[in-house]
Image: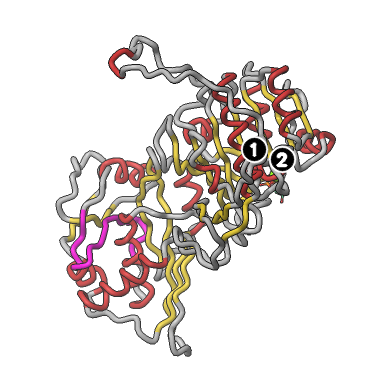
């Protein structure tokens, strides 16, 4: 048999190459390409006879598979309405963010509702997992524990036990004896994930894989696993904040972009049912530089406070520091303010922040960002009972955002009485909020700040 040749894989995006290079051609990352050991004589793929089914012959009478609810509302929503049997889910996140805590709580919750669950930890001994369960008050839940890293043993256990759900914490600790590479390497992670996912589909076991994300690229990130699974969730949060956000970035069985909000406490993660109230609860007295954005995260409206600080700079290139927003978006908004409204930020340091550790990706946040920047620069506070939303185009025009009514209703619920929105927004006025409709950024700036 010809010797299998080695291949090289980018740990950032998973692209493979025939030779090593310093920069990945696919994603542009530097120093992320590692050699991948060839798959040596692995288990022979079970030859399945090829068979094609005409799309029209598919049995359409079959009802959608029942979903299993965890009883943790924030988690169920992110999954698209509960766990789909025999699905494969990846939960990624920084080390220490709370993945093991979340999944142990979820497992216990599923188990209490009658789903047979197996929690396999490759990072902690069974006694440590039990100690954590004690701290979380979960020792009465009928969960089976395993502390194991050899995939062959795990698959045997799964085959014997046939649980409804198996948690693998984490995929980076798992190893297959047929792959000549260290656990955590791209080839091991990929091979282990592949074995587990195909087992899940074959035997009808739902599988949740935990994956650490590391920026250094030393350990294969969960990126290489993303395309193999049905659902990819990321667990994020700012260090120093107790809020954690579970975000669906891919979901075959539900909407992507859905979020679940949790708070890390001494007794584990608590659900946050009304995130708007939470993100706004710590609001200081109305001060210049603060604007409230009425956003939509997945299927529900979430209000967040955008904070800006503008100060004279003593640097040649003034600082642009952004937390919770895209820094490219800030540059664009600053450029539009300068070119279309005539308000430059040259010689000024700009700091922008979304309060509470939230991350905002919607373009509709533009208007609130511009408002916070102008408010900080002009030292004029925005009325504390006002929300804003709308996308800013490069011409300086304001573009209506989707779901205007939902945003306004959420704002009304939290005691806001006025909203500044783009002209042409579709509102029925049923939210009972007084609206100021603006055609462009110049009109907004003139009316709001007299600039
Ligand atoms: P962990 O779930 O181990 O993170 P991961 O699996 O993502 O690496 O969580 C680790 C952090 O959570 C740790 O710093 C301690 C904190 N924590 C709490 O604050 N409260 C708790 O009840 C638990 C179990 C952990
Ligand atoms: Mg962990």
**Would you say 265 lies left or right of 301 here?**
right
Observer-nearest of 442 and 149: 149
Q: Position of residue 301 (x, y in %)?
A: 37, 43
- Quadrant assignment for the C terminus: bottom left
- Disc 1 target residue: 192
Tell me the magenta residue range: 382-399
Quarter of the image for residue 360 reads bottom left
For this orientation, the residue located farthest to the top is 61
Q: What is the secondary structure assignment of the residue under circle 1?
A: helix
What residue appears at the point 68 percent right and 39 percent down from the top-left corner? 169
Q: Position of residue 320 (x, y in %)?
A: 44, 75
Kindly report the secondary structure that dominates the magenta region of the rendered protein: loop
- Kindly indicate whether the residue at mark 1 contacts the one at mark 2 (C-beta within 8 angstroms): yes
According to the image, label 2 marks what residue?
A: 175
Q: Quadrant of the N terminus?
A: top right
Q: Earlier in the sequence, mark 2 or mark 1?
A: 2
Q: Nearer the viewer, residue 318 or 34?
A: 34
Q: Label 1: few (<14), some or many (≥20) within 10 Å?
A: many
């Amino acid at each position: 048999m010809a010797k299998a040749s080695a291949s090289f894989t980018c740990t950032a995006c998973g692209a493979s190459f025939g030779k090593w290079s310093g920069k990945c051609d696919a994603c542009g990352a530097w120093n992320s390409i590692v050699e991948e050991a060839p798959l040596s004589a692995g288990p022979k793929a079970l030859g399945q006879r090829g068979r094609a089914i005409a799309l029209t012959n598919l049995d359409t009478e079959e009802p959608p598979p029942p979903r299993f609810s965890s009883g943790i509302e924030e988690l169920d929503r992110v999954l698209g309405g509960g766990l789909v049997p025999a699905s494969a889910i990846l939960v990624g996140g920084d080390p220490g963010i709370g993945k093991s805590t979340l999944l142990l709580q979820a497992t216990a919750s599923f188990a209490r509702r009658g789903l047979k669950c197996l929690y396999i930890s490759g990072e902690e001994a069974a006694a440590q997992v039990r100690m954590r369960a004690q701290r979380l008050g979960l020792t009465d839940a009928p969960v089976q524990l395993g502390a194991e890293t050899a995939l062959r043993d795990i698959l045997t256990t799964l085959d014997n036990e046939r649980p409804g759900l198996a948690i693998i914490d984490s995929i980076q600790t798992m190893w297959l004896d047929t792959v000549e590479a260290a656990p955590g390497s791209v080839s091991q992670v990929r091979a282990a994930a592949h074995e587990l996912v195909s087992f899940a589909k074959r035997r009808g076991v739902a599988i949740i894989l935990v994956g650490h994300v590391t920026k250094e690229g030393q350990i294969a990130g969960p990126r290489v696993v993303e395309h193999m699974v049905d659902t990819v969730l990321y667990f994020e949060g700012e260090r120093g904040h107790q809020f954690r956000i579970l975000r669906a970035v891919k979901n075959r069985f539900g909407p992507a972009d859905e979020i679940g909000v949790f708070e890390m406490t001494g007794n584990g993660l608590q659900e946050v049912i009304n995130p708007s109230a939470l993100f706004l609860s710590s609001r200081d007295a109305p001060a210049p530089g603060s604007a409230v954005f009425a956003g939509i995260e997945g299927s529900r409206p979430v209000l967040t406070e955008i904070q800006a600080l503008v100060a004279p700079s003593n640097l040649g290139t003034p600082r642009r520091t952004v937390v919770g927003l895209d820094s490219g978006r800030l540059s664009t908004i600053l450029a539009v303010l300068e070119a279309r409204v005539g308000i430059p930020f040259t010689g000024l340091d700009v700091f922008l922040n979304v309060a509470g550790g939230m991350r905002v990706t919607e373009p509709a946040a533009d208007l609130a960002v511009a408002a916070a920047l102008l408010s900080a620069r002009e030292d004029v506070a925005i009325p504390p009972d006002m929300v804003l939303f709308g996308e800013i185009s490069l011409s300086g025009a304001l573009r209506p955002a989707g779901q205007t009514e939902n945003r306004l209703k959420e704002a009304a619920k939290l005691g806001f009485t006025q909203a500044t929105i783009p002209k042409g927004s579709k509102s029925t006025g049923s939210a009972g909020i007084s609206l100021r409709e603006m055609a462009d950024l110049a009109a907004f700036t003139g009316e709001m700040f007299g600039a």
